[in-house]
Amino acid sequence: MNRTTSEQLYQEALQHIVGGVNSPSRSFKAVGGGAPVFMKRAGGSRFWDEDGNEYIDYLAAYGPIITGHAHPHITAAITEAAQNGILYGTPTQLEIKLAKMLKEAIPSMDKVRFVNSGTEAVMTTIRVARAYTKRSKIVKFAGCYHGHSDLVLVAAGSGPSTLGIPDSAGVPGSIAQEVITVPFNDLSGLREALEKWGGDVAAVMVEPIVGNFGMVMPEPGFLEGLCKLAHDNGSLVIYDEVITAFRFHYGSTQTYAGLDNHEDITPDLTALGKIIGGGLPIGAYGGRKHVMEQVAPLGPAYQAGTMAGNPASISAGIACLEVLQGQGVYEEMERLAIRLTEGLQESADRHGIPLTINRIRGAFSTHFCAHPITNYEEAQDTDGEMFASFFRHMLNRGINLAPSKYEAWFLTTAHTDADIDATLEAAEASFQAMAAE
Ligand code: PMP
């Protein structure tokens, strides 16, 4: 496959944009380097690059594009919003409509506030939890990603009873001292952390179904135990549902039929993003009324935004959720994901390639290893070189995946059986080539 134009554009981008990309996850650093593909156009399940090559897309822009690219209902909503004036700096009726839709689907959110990204949403939930509890520390789980604000770019110290270390240059050690990182699916680590730091812990933050070291379900009892330990300690529970909300069903983890005891796994605050903006920049956070009333102008916790709740993002979000309300859309994404994952597994097995697939409805992750993936340590202990090889073989056969062994594949409402057939054919050829390497 000829990608000369992408290579030239990458060289040009490198001169003007740091690292040639506007988000590090778009670089091919984790898959051996070189020029990422410069896409020119997208429609439905497909991408076309600057050299005219066509790809089937499973990146879905890291999640938001759940209805496929350029969905006509969303495009029409954005066009109408643009024609009516793009930004007002005043409240609009549209914001109420999307807020009500979110509240109906996620009952723990009595009150909502819109922001512009998942990062902002998460960052603000932490501020609100700190304001409400008048405590400063947070506990989070290893391998969960919560955006790029200082507090959540902190890695584990040497155990649950030690404070964190900065994961990024520019995050002061003093901030890392406010964060404790414990393993996912391990209540004893959380218990130990709360025993040591309990009176200082404002919140326990978690991706309740993980999307950032593959797709990983909480083990039975984990979320119940997490909520109970946090609440008994006087800490709030924050769910980062930036990936998971509206991903597996029309709702969030808190109401997902794949988990029991919904009242025992209800958080105090929820952070949202991605799907709820239909592909335009958005974030939102919400939670119990008396917690949310900490936020300005009602309360002392300040958060603001020039672009927050802008009519284009809100309109795209409403349109996206309307598509997702359609009959059977999640069932169809799941049906295709089952076909795809079963086919991938058979094909890998046939060629002696160790492959573990974690699938949750229409989303799944592929791990080159023979063990199950239930936490970050296990996800790290997989063959990155094999993933890189698979990624490149698939790309050269017209299948666009995320260039990282930790990212998920996302089915959209635009994928078809023909896409699955073509993807399985590409995978069979890729595994065959890998077996011969
Ligand atoms: N939380 C989670 C769970 C995410 O996956 C992400 C982004 N991948 C974020 C927060 C940050 O969202 P954004 O990139 O919109 O800032």
Image (cartoon, grey):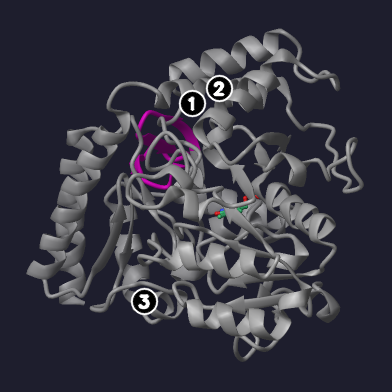
Looking at marks 2 and 3 on the same chain, the residue that comes earlier in the sequence is marked by 2
Q: Position of residue 335 (x, y in %)?
A: 20, 40
Can you tell which of label 1 and label 3 is closer to the viewer?
1
* Mark linked to residue 318: 2
User: Residue at 43% of width from left, 55% of height from top?
Assistant: 402
- Residue beneath disc 1: 321
Eyeballing the image, is 11 above or below 105? below
User: Which residue is depicted at the point 81% across and 55% down?
Assistant: 132
Please determine whether, in this image, residue 349 is positioned above or below residue 46: below
Quote the CA–CA distance across marks 2 and 3: 41 Å
The answer to whether residue 298 of the structure is visible from this angle is yes
State if disc 3 and disc 1 touch (CB < 8 Å): no
Q: CA distance from mark 2 to mark 1?
A: 5 Å
**Residue 149 % position (x, y):** 74, 60
- In this orientation, which residue lies closer to the viewer: 400 or 229? 229
Q: Which residues are magenta?
A: 40-60
Residue 213 painted magenta: no
Q: Residue at x 47, y 62 (%)?
A: 223
Which of these two is toward me, 385 or 259?
Answer: 259
Residue 47 located within the stretch drawn in magenta: yes
Mark 2 Cα-neighbour bin, 10 Å: few <14, some 14–19, many ≥20: many
